[in-house]
């Protein structure tokens, strides 16, 4: 039942409806609802990651597909972990992803008054009671998967007594943990969530939105269905771990007497193989200084992906390829790389950048002469036009494109060998210079004027083509190359102590990178293909005019193949 709406080149478009669409179709057909309203309900307690992107795009996409509404709602009912900083970062991420909530931005904390009223209603109906049991006792009384729970000794309190106690809880007459409000459902239920779950707890804490107005806070399982119902959500889509909570969700909306209540549908979370997504672990990486904040380009928070150079289109494509299902599975990071490569391939200009430069001197090229050569911006997309690149006697090439004693099948520069300089001429290596330590410092060559690119010269063939930049006008920049943060051989977590298995080579900084003059005006987030080196993006935080910093988004090639649909 996977959604296989794949539009790869040359592939037939196969559209099958995933199970959530099928459920919604059925609800509309049977008149359960006459419209669709979905929501994305994050807790503002951290940054969003690629998994959240799936939930956002799924909920927003369904609202669009059915001509319905999409609500952006902060589930800010737990004051311990929530911060305004996260509210802002979350909104920025969602906007960037392309999900538009228009004027439908809500905060669950705005409904605290209505939640309180619903709790009072439940008490009046005999469906809720105040208990004095401690947290430990409640756990003990709850029983286990094999054993039923025991009745709470306070469950017999009268409606009047419960109303008075609950009001006293609200008025701050009790300490944290002294009293809770519980639903009266069934201590013998086979579903532990139904064994008189806690609805409200006492917590003397300052809330980021409501300040000190409340000292009792609703529990997630009580608050969430009420939030959905108040907003007129029809399909409350959440992840699989809430499947066992659905009977409680249905109980809450029914007993609270909401007309036309929402229904909960669960789908499997998106996981990435060998990638750290847990908030706890990311927090530790940040605190230990292993990564440079929550948006370090090696992480998969949405902020990090954006900073690295991923585009909303690439993430949309990735989420689409992952599909929507009820079976837990894990996607390969290579699939995410495939999506960004496909996106950047046709949209970004190609330029020549040398990561680790060494000088190349063309001994027979006239001193002081400069030719402005044409370089196509993108061979696969002629619409991107071309630019000029100055060619002169002294150039820089990659250190790895010269070898004194080449191994077999090395077709680049070595004494006596001829290669093509991209967009320019054939050059033949005639010698090289070394410093005192024996390191090669300069490579010498001669060029053949008859072999200019575009001249139609075809007498000789050469096997190697290398890129270069002119010595004059080359732009000095920093390029950051990334590998997985995690040691893929060992897996994410150390089996013994649960720590992370880190890859010591996850970041390589090339701080002496030289690029063609055309790059000089590159702006934050601008993307380029650096010939033979990969796709890069200007880092919006660290890059400055005159001191550009590029992040490698992805290398040029991979072994990833699009799954056959
Ligand atoms: P926490 O552990 O703090 O609850 P969370 O990642 O579940 O972390 P929420 O703010 O509760 O954070 O998540 C918001 C929404 O995103 C929820 O509806 C949740 O189901 C969904 N979501 C979270 N992680 C994933 C994931 N890996 N794949 C798909 N959806 C996810
Ligand atoms: Mg959650």
Image (cartoon, helix red, strand yellow):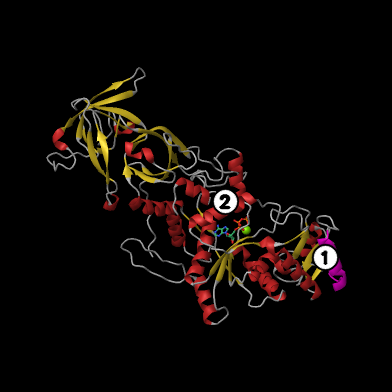
Q: Is residue 557 left or right of residue 103?
A: left
Residue at the farthest bottom position: 30
Q: Residue at x 32, y 24 (%)?
A: 440
Q: Is residue 256 visible?
A: yes
Whether residues under marks 2 and 1 lie with C-beta atoms below 8 angstroms apart, the answer is no
Q: Is residue 309 above or below residue 15?
A: above
Q: Is residue 404 visible?
A: no
Kindly indicate the quadrant of the structure image that contains residue 210.
bottom right
Could you say where residue 260 lies in the image, as x and y percent from the top left? 63, 77
Q: Is residue 538 left or right of residue 117?
A: left
Q: Earlier in the sequence, mark 2 or mark 1?
A: 2
Q: Which region shows up in magenta?
A: 155-171
Residue at the farthest left position: 459
Secondary structure under tag 2 reads helix
- Closer to us: 188 or 461: 461
Neighbourhood count class around disc 1 (C-alpha, 10 Å): few under 14, some 14–19, many 20 upward: many
Could you say where residue 150 lies in the image, as x and y percent from the top left? 80, 67
Could you say where residue 428 lies in the image, as x and y percent from the top left? 20, 30
Q: Which mark is residue 166?
A: 1
- Which residue in the protein does label 2 denote? 89
Q: Which mark is residue 273?
A: none
Kindly indicate the quadrant of the structure image that contains residue 6.
bottom left
Q: If the image is split into quadrants, where does the C terminus sit?
A: bottom left
Q: Is residue 193 above or below residue 85?
A: below
Q: Is residue 447 left or right of residue 21?
A: left
Q: Is residue 3 above or below residue 203?
A: below
Please check the rendered image and state whether residue 258 is part of the magenta-colored stretch, yes or no: no
Neighbourhood count class around disc 2 (C-alpha, 10 Å): few under 14, some 14–19, many 20 upward: some
Write down which quadrant ligand 1 falls in. bottom right
């Amino acid at each position: 039942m996977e959604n296989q709406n794949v539009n790869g080149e040359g592939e037939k478009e196969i559209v099958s409806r995933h199970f959530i669409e099928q459920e919604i179709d059925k609800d509309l057909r049977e008149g359960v609802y006459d419209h669709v309203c979905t929501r994305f309900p994050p807790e503002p307690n951290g940054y969003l990651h690629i998994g959240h992107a799936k939930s956002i795009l799924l909920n927003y996409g369904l609202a669009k597909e059915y001509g319905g509404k999409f609500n952006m709602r902060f589930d800010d009912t737990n004051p311990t972990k929530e911060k305004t900083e996260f509210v802002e970062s979350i909104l920025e991420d969602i906007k960037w992803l392309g999900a538009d909530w228009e004027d439908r931005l809500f905060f669950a904390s705005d409904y605290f008054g209505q939640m309180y009223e619903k709790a009072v209603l439940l008490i009046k109906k005999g469906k809720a009671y105040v208990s004095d049991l401690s947290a430990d006792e409640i756990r003990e009384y709850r029983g286990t998967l094999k054993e039923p729970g025991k009745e709470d000794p306070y469950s017999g309190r009268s409606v009047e007594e419960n109303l008075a106690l609950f009001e006293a809880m609200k008025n701050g007459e009790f300490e944290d943990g002294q009293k809770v409000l519980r639903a009266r459902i069934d201590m013998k239920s086979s579903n532990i969530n139904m064994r008189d779950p806690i609805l409200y707890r006492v917590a003397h804490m300052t809330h980021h939105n409501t300040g000190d107005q409340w000292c009792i806070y609703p529990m997630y399982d009580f608050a969430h269905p009420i939030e959905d119902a108040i907003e007129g959500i029809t399909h409350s889509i959440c992840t699989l771990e809430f499947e066992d909570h659905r009977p409680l969700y249905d109980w809450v909306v029914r007993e609270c007497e909401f007309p036309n209540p929402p229904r909960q549908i669960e789908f499997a979370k998106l996981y990435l193989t060998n990638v750290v997504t847990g908030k706890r672990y990311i927090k530790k990486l940040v605190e230990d200084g292993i990564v440079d904040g929550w948006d370090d380009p090696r992480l998969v928070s949405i902020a990090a992906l954006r900073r690295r150079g991923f585009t909303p289109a690439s993430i949309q494509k990735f989420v689409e390829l992952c599909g929507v299902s009820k079976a837990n599975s894990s996607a390969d990071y290579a699939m995410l790389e495939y999506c960004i490569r496909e996106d950047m391939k046709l949209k970004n200009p190609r330029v020549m950048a040398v990561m680790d430069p060494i000088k190349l001197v063309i001994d027979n090229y006239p001193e002081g002469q400069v030719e402005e050569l044409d370089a196509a911006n993108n061979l696969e997309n002629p619409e991107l036009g071309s630019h000029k690149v100055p060619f002169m006697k002294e150039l820089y090439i990659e250190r790895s494109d010269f070898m004194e004693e080449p191994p077999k099948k090395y077709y680049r520069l070595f004494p006596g060998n001829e290669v093509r300089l991209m967009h320019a001429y054939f050059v033949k290596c005639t010698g090289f210079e070394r410093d005192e330590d024996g390191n090669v410092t300069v490579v010498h060559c001669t060029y053949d004027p008859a072999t200019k690119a575009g001249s139609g010269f075809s007498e000789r063939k050469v096997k190697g083509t290398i890129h270069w930049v002119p010595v004059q006008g080359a732009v000095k920049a920093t390029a950051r190359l990334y590998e997985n943060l995690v040691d893929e051989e060992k897996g994410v977590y150390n089996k013994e102590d649960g720590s992370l298995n880190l890859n010591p080579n996850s970041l390589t900084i090339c701080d002496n990178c030289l690029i063609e003059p055309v790059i000089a005006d590159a702006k934050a987030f601008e993307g380029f293909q650096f010939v033979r080196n990969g796709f890069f993006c200007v880092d919006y935080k660290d890059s400055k005019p005159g001191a550009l910093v590029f992040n490698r988004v992805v290398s040029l090639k991979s072994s990833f193949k699009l799954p056959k649909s």
